[in-house]
Image: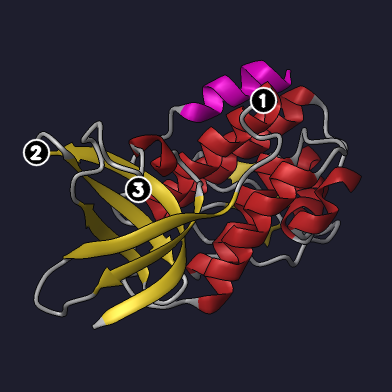
Amino acid sequence: MLVTTKGIVLHSLKYSETSIIVRIYAEACGLQSYLFKGIRNPKSKTKAGLFQPLTLLEVTAYLSEKTSLHMAKEVRLFQPYMSIHSDIRKSSIALFMNELLYKSIREEEKNQELFDFLWKSCLLLDSTGNNLNCFALVFTAELTHYLGIQPQPEFSEKKPVFNLKESQFEPIIPDKDAYILPEHGKLFHSLITTPIENQAALHFKPAVRRSLLDSLLLYYQIHIPGFKPMNSHHILHSVLS
């Protein structure tokens, strides 16, 4: 079946001397792998540089139920970024977002809400000139909604401790070490209830941002089977500190 769809590049790797395989989160069919033949040939009109992480594409490909690797027919840049590649803050956030998506998304089927959120977030990162310090943090928190692992936002003065394993606020610190400190409970509640469009309204100190992001990544490891430790958040902490 020949399908044309918008897609977001998550990962690419060399395949043979002239081809590449690209993992793309596509609007029409979720996370899929596409074979682009001849892309690395010097005479190819389409260059391998088109498949940088989070690039927004339109792909036409032959989808088959008999294989997990689909043959790409055509590809074009759907919308170029204007500032992500030239702004070290934005490029660092994009690197983090890409790694998070690559390690957390498993769906090989259409999920329009998830796709719309990812597409919107990429464009927002590129276009915003506001405070970006909490962008990655809010993105990580809101993504949990679309992955089906969203924290329960029932914070109160009587329940200020967030238990990462139980995904809920509780009155006392649990025996295990997977929790968010009571003094950060209210901040975490504001984080998980703030949409990505309003991320600039949050103002957390660098140490708080680092602590909350580290806690969120631990939350992902607890609730997503096979989620491997992240690396790019260390760069993010350094750039945004």
Q: Quadrant of the N terminus?
A: bottom left
Q: Is residue 223 visible?
A: no
- Dot 2 alpha-carbon crowd within 10 angstroms: few under 14, some 14 to 19, many 20 or more: few
State the residue position of label 2: 16
- Dot 3 alpha-carbon crowd within 10 angstroms: few under 14, some 14 to 19, many 20 or more: some
State the residue position of label 1: 86
Amino acid bearing label 3: Phe
- Locate residue 94: give its quadrant: top right
Q: Taking 237 as reference, is 119 above or below it?
A: below
Chain part drawn in magenta:
232-241
Is there a contact, CB below 8 Å, between mark 3 and mark 1? no
Question: With 222 as the anchor, is 213 left or right in this view?
Answer: right
Number of labelled discs?
3
Q: Nearer the viewer, residue 27 or 205?
A: 27
State the residue position of label 3: 227
Q: Nearer the viewer, residue 161 or 214?
A: 214
- x, y percentage for residue 121? 66, 54
Amino acid bearing label 1: Ser
Q: Taking 164 as reference, is 217 above or below it?
A: above
Q: Is residue 174 visible?
A: yes
- x, y percentage for residue 186? 82, 50
